[in-house]
Image: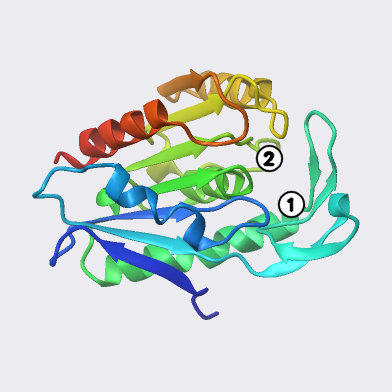
């Protein structure tokens, strides 16, 4: 299996940490790349940011229209019916990026996964099943699509998790973010939950909180 194409940015010449950031439905890796300078990370930050591009596939809820997607969405019900097989397959494709970062000398505990909407659903599955301890998961405006089938890795049973959601989100209702937080809390995870008066997007206050979380998790 070959690596998906991706946008790669670094905040220093010798990265000692990596953030792998997954976009939402219909977007690509360029969607979140502009956020890196807005994070205003410390000047000494040596972070590699990877923004993979999802492949283009037909999406059922969009009339079968072919667009960048991590998996097919079959029904837009409150809990969503998705193609779990495709979701798991996408997680395996992103797993290769983590493996490569470790090969490049990055400690697995200094690798963070971030995902928005569809990308967050993939990030949930991958981060909780990866066989080495990761540094954390940032789940934005998303849902835990594989909670009923996932087998959590012992290596990430204490994974730090931050969940962020818009209170007026018409695409992924906030109760799906709250449901994910409740499930993970029941499983023993310590979850940081934050919401914002916005729809299915990212706001300036949230960017500040993302930056703070990155700095906290990576000890910058």
Residue 206 disc label: none
* Tag 1 residue: 84
Q: Is residue 120 left or right of residue 96?
A: right
Q: At which x and y percent is residue 156?
A: 41, 41
In the structure shown, which secondary structural element does the residue marked by tag 1 occupy? Answer: helix
Q: Are marks 1 and 2 in contact (CB under 8 Å)?
A: yes
Q: Is residue 145 left or right of residue 38?
A: right
Q: At which x and y percent is residue 108?
A: 29, 54
Taking depth in this image into account, of 190 and 40 the one nearest to the observer is 40
- Residue depicted at 78% across the width and 56% down the height: 72
Residue 145 disc label: 2
Q: Is residue 124 left or right of residue 161?
A: right
Examine the rendered structure and indicate whether residue 181 appears above or below residue 27: above
Q: At which x and y percent is residue 163?
A: 48, 29
The quadrant the C terminus occupies is: top left
- Residue depicted at 84% across the width and 38% down the height: 76
């Amino acid at each position: 299996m070959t690596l998906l194409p991706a946008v790669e940015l670094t905040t220093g010449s010798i990265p000692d940490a990596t953030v792998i950031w997954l976009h939402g439905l219909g977007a690509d890796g360029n969607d979140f790349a502009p956020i890196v300078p807005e994070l205003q990370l410390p000047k000494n930050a040596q972070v590699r940011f990877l923004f993979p591009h999802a492949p283009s596939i037909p999406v059922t809820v969009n009339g079968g229209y072919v667009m960048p997607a991590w998996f097919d969405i079959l029904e837009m019900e409150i809990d969503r019916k998705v193609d779990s097989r495709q979701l798991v397959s996408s997680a395996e494709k992103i797993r290769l990026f983590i493996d490569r970062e470790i090969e490049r000398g990055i400690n697995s505990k200094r690798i963070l996964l971030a995902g928005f909407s569809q990308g967050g659903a993939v990030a949930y599955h991958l981060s909780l099943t990866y066989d080495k301890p990761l540094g954390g998961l940032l789940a934005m405006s998303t849902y835990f699509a594989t909670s009923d089938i996932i087998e959590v890795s012992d290596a990430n049973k204490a994974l730090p998790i931050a969940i962020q959601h818009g209170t007026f989100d018409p695409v992924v209702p906030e109760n799906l973010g709250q449901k994910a937080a409740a499930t993970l809390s029941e499983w023993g995870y310590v979850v940081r939950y934050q919401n914002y008066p916005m729809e299915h997007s990212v706001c300036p206050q949230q960017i500040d909180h993302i930056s703070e979380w990155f700095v906290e998790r990576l000890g910058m």
